[in-house]
Image (cartoon, helix red, strand yellow):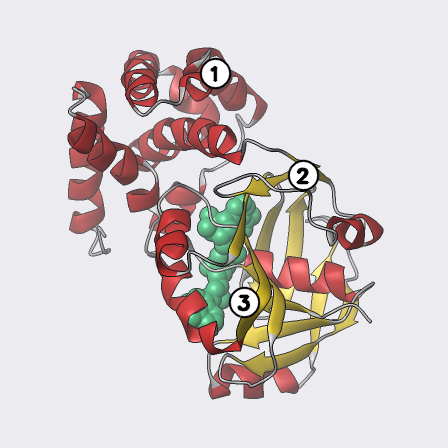
Amino acid sequence: MNAPWHILGAGSLGCLWAARLQQHLDTRLILRNKAQLKAFQKHASIQLFDSPLAVEPSVHQVKAELASAKDTITKLVLCTKAYDALDAVKSVAHRFTDKTQIVLLQNGVGSQQAIQQAFPHIRLIACATTEGAYLKEPFCVIWAGHGVTRLGDFGEPKAQPQWLDEWKSAGFNYDWTDDIETTLWRKLGVNCIINSLTALHECSNGELTRPQNMVNLLAYDLQDLMIAAKQPKAAADLHALVWQVIEDTSRNQSSMLQDIKRGRRTEMQYMIGYAYEKAKQLDVEMPAVRKIYQQLCEKIDSLGLPVN
Ligand code: NAP
């Protein structure tokens, strides 16, 4: 029998992944604490609205447990924010075996390396997903955008994991790559620009045509950084990619702007904060990135939100 899937973090993506996997495979949700477990056990299910316009949700019975449970974990999907990722993995490390693999859904760059350093013997599969989801209420998720998840080994590429067949049978739209690092860096470049500027100016993605010059200056800086970081494939045509994403998502609000509006901690240190620190390490001059990073820190601090 196939080993169960464990989903760590019952937020937007965690509920989406759990509800979808559960329809085909043994799936367990790992919850934060006893209070959350008790709240979940009232219905012991996740409600999934297939789109923001869907009238009725589908209901999925899912098993739930705490990190402290004893049974081993073979396939883990980590669904926390980037800043919670390492602590969350540590909380279940007593359940790992030499077969354990972890799928990392975190946005940005930095959390993957931190986990790799702490767990060098665990196979890590990093993702860049365009799936979109948000919670209507706890354990009730709206699948806002049906997207694609690109994934690949973080570190040495290996043969595709056999469990991809399980994702296929569960209807996941995925794309395996032997070079997830380039994908993560390209997405980092896009996120550094779009998330930072939309959060700073409190505007939709499409409205970035107004600070057009700053979009281009940031893209030049980030290309310099990518070259210095030996990521030339990520640097290629970065401007064109960023403008294409702005056009394709013109009506969207970036995740950083949404976090700021909801008074939630942002993932800025895994986006522009990562680029800023990496530039310092590699001694790359990035005047536009430095300026926007500092303005963003000031804004987030003035709102009483953590800057780390
Ligand atoms: P989210 O809704 O905030 O969910 C994260 C969940 O993880 C929260 O329920 C959080 O609990 C839980 N958590 C954190 N630490 C935990 C721990 N130690 N043990 C158990 N649970 C823990 O975030 P999300 O929107 O799903 O995003 C997850 C990641 O995917 C982020 O990096 C995000 O940028 C990326 N992403 C999201 C989307 C999307 O559409 N939502 C799309 C693409 C990428 P608390 O609430 O108690 O902290």
* Left or right, residue 224 beside residue 5: left
Identity of the residue drawn at 63% across and 43% down: 131
Decide which of 268, 222 is in the foreground and name it.
222
Q: Is mark 2 within 8 Å of ligand 1?
A: yes
Q: Which mark is residue 243?
A: 1
On the image, numbered disc 3 is attached to which residue? 8
Is mark 2 in CB contact (under 8 Å) with mark 3?
no
Disc nearer the start of the sequence (2/3): 3
Q: Is mark 3 within 8 Å of ligand 1?
A: yes
Residue type (three-letter) at the residue carrying disc 3: Leu
Decide which of 120, 209 is in the foreground and name it.
120
* Left or right, residue 126 beside residue 293: right
Q: Position of residue 214 (x, y in %)?
A: 28, 17
Disc nearer the start of the sequence (3/1): 3
Residue 135: tell me if it is visible.
no
Marks 1/2: CA–CA distance: 19 Å
Q: Secondary structure at mark 1?
A: helix
Marks 3/1: CA–CA distance: 34 Å
